[in-house]
Amino acid sequence: MNIKNTTSELLFGLTIFVGLIPLAFMFSQKGTQLLIETSFRYFVWCGEAIVLFLLLLTKQNLKKKQMIALATLCLLVPFTFTFNENGVTFLILDKYINSILSWLMASVLFSKLISNSNIIEKSSR
């Protein structure tokens, strides 16, 4: 078993899970609520911060397509919206901590993607 591939697969799956967790909801007496609107928001923030630090501290072992997909996911999740009688309502965009953490993860992934492609281009010359 290759440790690098296992770490890459674990990081990929964890990033997808944590990238989508702000969209998770629960049923309560008040109706359906997003987790980031309840007391569980601290767990969501901690999960996003942990993945951000893992992305910052680990070496580049994700594939190019995986990084593009993860960065796009993290970039677009804060822009999720619903339609209601008042028009369009953004679910997460006004939750600033979640939006910032998600965009930081996307920027780290994009920067690793760019720096990795620059290293490959320079080494092939």
Image (cartoon, rainbow, N blue to C red):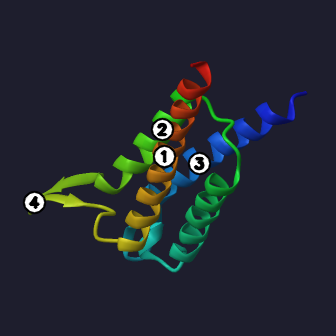
Q: Which residue is mark 3?
A: 15
- Badge 3 marks a residue whose secondary structure is helix
Residue behind mark 2: 114
Q: Nearer the viewer, mark 4 or mark 2?
A: 2
For the residues labelled 3 and 1, the Cα–Cα distance comes to 16 Å
Using the numbered discs, state the Cα–Cα distance from disc 4 to disc 2 in whole angstroms: 42 Å
* Tag 2 and tag 1, C-beta contact below 8 Å: yes
Ranked by sequence position, the earlier of labels 3 and 1 is 3
Q: How far apart are labels 2 and 1 at the CA level?
A: 5 Å
Question: Where is residue 47 drawn, in percent x and y?
Answer: 61, 64
Q: Are marks 4 and 1 in contact (CB under 8 Å)?
A: no
Query: Identity of the amino acid at label 1?
Result: Ser
Residue type, label 2: Ile
Q: Closer to the N terminus: mark 2 or mark 3?
A: 3
Image mark count: 4
**Alpha carbon of mark 3 to alpha carbon of mark 4: how far?**
34 Å
